Amino acid sequence: MKTIFHSEESRGHANHGWLNAKHSFSFASWYNPDRVHFGALRVLNDDIVAGHAGFGKHPHDNMEIITIPLKGAIKHEDSMGNSSIIEAGEIQVMSAGTGILHSELNPIKEELNLFQIWIFPNKQNVEPRYDQFKMDQSGMKNNFLQLVSPSTDDEGTWIHQDAWITMAKIDKNTTLDYKLKKEGNGVYFMQVDGESNISGQHLKQRDALGVWDTISVSVEAMNESTIVAIEVPMAF
């Protein structure tokens, strides 16, 4: 088993007033040659967006983009004609493919906090696609609930990559075993809140741990914890 620990304090940081952003991997003006990606995981941004502010219309292509609001709501509009509100407790997926324009705005006065995840696809120049759904909060209790997978027939939604995103809410002093879905994959654990011990590494809020060259990972919640697990190919 191999691991890499990323503390909350080691993340990149950019405060634009309306946007307070933390970057787990190199992004925009923050560049760290040791923190460009974890396998096919390219971006994990932790953004706080002020009320009635946001990202105007901008382009993406050939990237799988997953947005998880943790607090508040986000209004999405895109060049495919989609217009929707994604609230905390929901997840949004966009396959940018051949190219898409979209905007992301905070439609209310309260702050919006979201995770945005970018994963390199395994197919280039696909037809752009959009999806969103409400997460089963009860299904996360002491369980890594599947949100994203490579299969259209699986639980949750899907992307163009042999990647899985799961999320768990774990009771204090409870241990779960995360079993990797595919040989050659690694998993990047983000401690959303609480504290845990993952493969012997202590994680506090917003710390992260990448794990690979293993088939299973032990996750022990030291107190009540919410954890996002992003499993991706390490070679792609």
Image (spheres, rainbow, N blue to C red):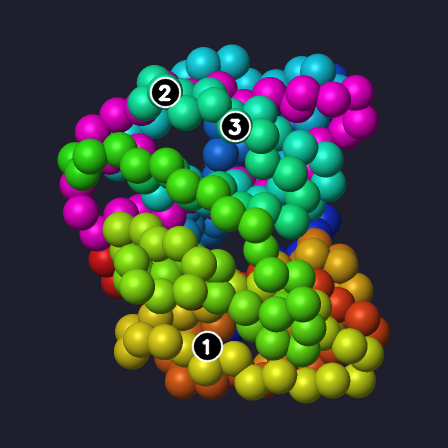
Q: Relative to residue 59, is residue 182 depicted above or below?
A: below
- At horizontal 68% and vertical 73% (from top left) the residue drawn is 141
Residue under label 1, please give it: 2
Of the 4 image quadrants, the one containing the N terminus is bottom left
Tell me which segment is drawn in magenta.
96-124
Amino acid type at circle 2 is Gly
Which picture quadrant has residue 109?
Answer: top right
- At horizontal 23% and vertical 57% (from top left) the residue drawn is 236
Does label 1 or label 3 sit earlier along the sequence?
A: 1
- At horizontal 65% and vertical 49% (from top left) the residue drawn is 89
In the rendered structure, the answer to whether residue 199 lies left or right of residue 83 reads right
Residue under label 3, please give it: 84
Amino acid type at circle 1 is Lys
Residue 203: say if magenta. Answer: no
In the rendered structure, the answer to whether residue 64 lies left or right of residue 227 reads left
* Front position among marks 1 and 3: 3
Distance between the alpha carbons at the discs numbered 2 and 1: 44 Å
Residue under label 2, please give it: 81
Which picture quadrant has residue 197?
Answer: bottom right
